[in-house]
Image (cartoon, rainbow, N blue to C red):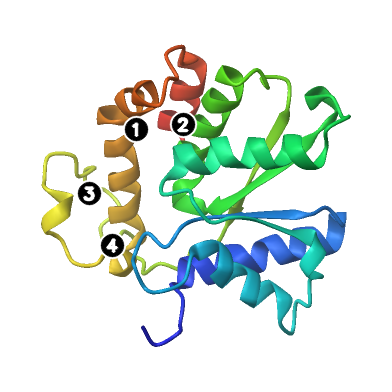
Amino acid sequence: PDGSVPLTLANRTKHAAQLHKTLGAPIILSGADVSRVGITEAQAMKRILSAAPHGVAKEALLLDESAKNTIENARNTLSIIRKHAPGVATKDIKMYLVTSDFHCPRSEFIFRNVFESEGASDLMIEASAAFSGLPDDISNSPEQEMLTGFNFQRMKDINDWGIFRRLCHEHALMTNLMGLELREYGVEQQNPQHFDNATNQ
């Protein structure tokens, strides 16, 4: 409502800008207005990237404003890649998957499974984690056990959680929900190696 964006979104946008400066590749910005703040995540990131100090050219910013979750992020991203590189074999494409550090394992798991289900298993994906900047809620108690059996929905705004709590949440989603949610989107075949890689991280 005040025009600001969550720190995690700002940090991953900055990270994408740095990659763009190094590689010169276009940036796909994916995200609907899930929080109902009056602007899609894609548009919010576009505003940041187009303005100083980043100054990314608008033609280098490809938007998906309909994705409401990471599965839809993956599907819509692949659709944009195919639209803008129609004559390029997927084996010749490398994509840098930019997301927050705590979200990287699950995000990579989803993207790899979705791409494989859509016939793009040979498209190279490299996860590129952006520093989340979330509060440190683990250093004072490094031996604390993972939180798995509580109701996350009753907790305060997820954007205010610490890094440990977010990691617990991501792990709970991976172990309890992601397989089912992928199947609901028609991704029946899921590579167990991708699951092991994500949960081991």
Measuring 19% from the left and 44% from the top, which residue is drawn there?
147
Q: Judge from the rendering whether residue 193 lies leftward or rightward of residue 173; answer left or right.
A: right
In the image, is residue 3 above or below residue 50? Answer: below
- Report the amino acid beneath label 1: Met
Within 10 Å of disc 1 (Cα), the crowding (few <14, some 14-19, many 20+) is many
Q: Judge from the rendering whether residue 87 lies leftward or rightward of residue 43; answer left or right.
A: right
- Report the amino acid beneath label 2: Ala
Query: What is the number of callouts on the image?
Result: 4
Q: Which residue is under mark 2?
A: 198
Sequence-wise, which precedes: disc 2 or disc 4? 4
- Does the residue at mark 4 contact the one at mark 3 (Cβ under 8 Å)? no
- Report the amino acid beneath label 4: Ile
- Distance, label 1 to label 2, CA atoms, is 8 Å
User: Residue 174 has which mark?
Assistant: 1
- Report the amino acid beneath label 3: Gln
Q: Which residue is under mark 3?
A: 144
- Distance, label 4 to label 1, CA atoms, is 17 Å
